[in-house]
Amino acid sequence: MKKYLTLLQSNPLYYYGIAVFIFLISLNSYLLFILLISYLYYFRRRYHFITMIVLISFILILIFKYNETKNQKMINNITFLIVDIKEYDKKSVITLYNKNKRYNLKTNKNYKLGSYLLVSGEIKEYDHLRIPNGFDAYKYYQGKGILGEIVNYQISDLPNYNYLYYIQEKIRNIDSNEYLKIFFQGEKSEVNDDLKILNITHYLSLSGIHLYLLIEILKFFMRQFDLKKQDYYITSMLLIVCIITNYKMTILRFVVYYIFRMINRFKNLKLDDLSLLNLSFLFLICLFPFNMFSQGFLLMYLLGNAILLLRPIYADKSFVLKNVIISSIISIILIPFNNSINVLSILLSPIFLLGIIYILLPYSIIIAVVPSFSVLNIDVIFEKVIQYIADRRINFNFSIPTMSAYAKILFYTILILIFFVSNKKRIILVFLQAFIMIIPIIKIKTSSPTLYFLDVGQGDSAVYISGEVVIVVDAYKNVSGFLKSLGIKRINYLIITHSDNDHSEEANTLIDNFLIDNIIINKHDEKYRIYNKNILEVDAGYIINYKEVIMEFYGPIRRYDSTNNNSLVFKLKYFDSEVLFTGDIEKEAEIDIANYYGDRLKSNILKIAHHGSNTSTSKEILLYIKPEIAIISLGKNNKYGFPNSEVIQNLYKEKVMIYRTDQDTTLIYKDNIFYKCYEKGW
């Protein structure tokens, strides 16, 4: 304990750095300003008050200045440099740079890194969070300094070329060396799924921890050189890595820290590593203000401080044991940012880290230069080992729901306290930490029944959760990530209304990654993908009673020529709620169902068929359903022009309240009230 306190008391820069850190995370959770005020008051004798006020005021000015750059809606004949290219199945996303402004642009054309383009077009802002615990495109790109996407554009190629991107372009075009792309360009699409299961993908993306360990090896081989020569060679290597990785922030952060450290030694400034880390943090925020909004950058700062503060634990240990402790610290600190804890992966993370840095990374570089060395198949051996371990994850993998910002703060607060208290109190804190991690699970298990209509774009996905009951209705996209964010591993019923891709694309992903008790499909649709277990083929008249839920199936009444008309139509009843799901049925099937079931169709909520197409939702069926609320699942600015105005008018005439996922994001029905994703503060 005394070691840690002495370390902190001798670091005034630490107090400024951590104050800025708390201030920045408070921007997303305003209640955390209480934490900032408490921190500033408690440590008021450790820093200079005026300096602190000036620093935070300066950060505020940077925020306002940065936000001003986002007001631009159009660009006209601006010259841009291509600084990044991400390739997907049908399109590429290129990142364009001009005078500290970055934009993305989707294109079918092949471009090279380092090329220049003359661009005109409109700037579209990225969407905020649209699914609970999901991907917030706006915040993600804001943290990368990307101000929006250029749409409706005109492009002219320019003859100029920036040769600083030559090596990056060569690496990008090496098809046979996927790990080199992952290391130097962060191509996450290339990452093996087994690595994701084990939560070790961060070890593959080149970062400060990799450089730190590589420098340790370089110093060993250069021990006959004086410090000045060592610094020269190491700094040269770091600058080359910076260029190759396109000034990746995780690399740049370490390079700045190392240069500050070198200056500190030569100028005898007597700043220790913790002060230098915080100086680097503040310097990079001033140099690249978008770092203030980057979760990755703030997390790297947190990791760096933890590794340095906990140095007394591993400082006198052997090289191998030191790396074991450091990688374990990283794994523990990253727990709040994962939806699972893989105990085996935490235990083996030091081996993964050392194997990746000292074997896989050098091998990937060597075979890029000398392809004949690929016969060693080290990458294949690595993947087989990872697959073997991942296949046994069922015994070691524990799902945890996504933590709120406040839960994360509490997690790290307790983690810090564990190192400052006596052994008896430490045991209590460990149990408290475990309890904090299971609170979200208890909350989900004891919460009122909740029905989610997920905003998945131009498709359908809905999820019902109540205690131990989990029902998924259609699975276009994002269902897997959503369920994992809630710590859910078992699905009681997966219902695929029909085989169209916009209802079933993610079905096999769910089957592979979750325990599914029953998969329900309709009898008359022969285009389903092969689902190889627990299949129930149903049609009209089938009834399922499961705990508090009753599902009555009204369609298909007969076999139709149309896949849409063969959709499962059923009513989900629980307590005093009745929700009618209609798949993509069209008027032919609607009339058959209405004539056969009549008033039995009455439901207070109607999931509108076929995304609001005029082929469905006829006046005739609405007279029997008599819905109070209608849900339309559709993509924002979709090319089909859905929802059709005729459908909207039919609903208005029946005085039905309409919710649309393209406008309202994910819709959450709980305790007879509808919430929108952003209203719940996810």
Image (cartoon, rainbow, N blue to C red):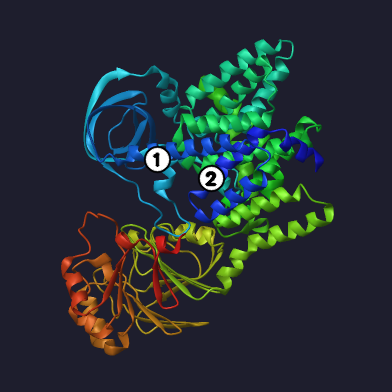
Q: In which quarter of the image is residue 290?
A: top left
Q: Measuring from the top left, give residue 460's x and y in whole percent.
A: 35, 64
Q: Measuring from the top left, give residue 429's x and y in whole percent.
A: 74, 57
- Left or right of 513 in this view: 585: left
Mark 2: which amino acid?
Answer: Phe
Q: Is mark 1 on a helix, strand or loop?
A: helix
For image coordinates 58% across by 28% down, the residue present is 254
Depth order, front residue of 21/654? 21
| Residues packed near mark 2 inside 10 Å, few (<14), some (14 to 19) or many (20 plus) | many
Q: Measuring from the top left, give residue 57's x and y in whole percent.
A: 48, 38
Q: Quadrant of residue 619?
A: bottom left
CA–CA distance in space, label 1 to label 2: 15 Å
Residue 489 position (above or below residue 200): below
Depth order, front residue of 383/133? 133
Q: Measuring from the top left, give residue 674's x and y in whole percent.
A: 38, 72
Dot label at residue 635: none
Task: Inspect this view and state whether residue 366 appears.
Answer: yes
- Left or right of 500 in this view: 297: right
Depth order, front residue of 49/532? 49
- Left or right of 358 in this view: 201: left
Mark 1: which amino acid?
Answer: Phe
Q: What element carries label 2?
A: helix
Question: Of callouts 1 and 2, which one flags the residue occurring earlier in the amino acid sequence?
Answer: 2
For image coordinates 32% across by 88% down, the residue present is 600
Tally the marks: 2
Task: Inspect this view and state whether residue 313 appears.
Answer: no
Residue 241 position (above or below residue 46): above
- The residue indicated by pointer 1 is 64
- Left or right of 352 in this view: 536: left
Dot label at residue 23: 2
For image coordinates 69% across by 17% down, the residue present is 268
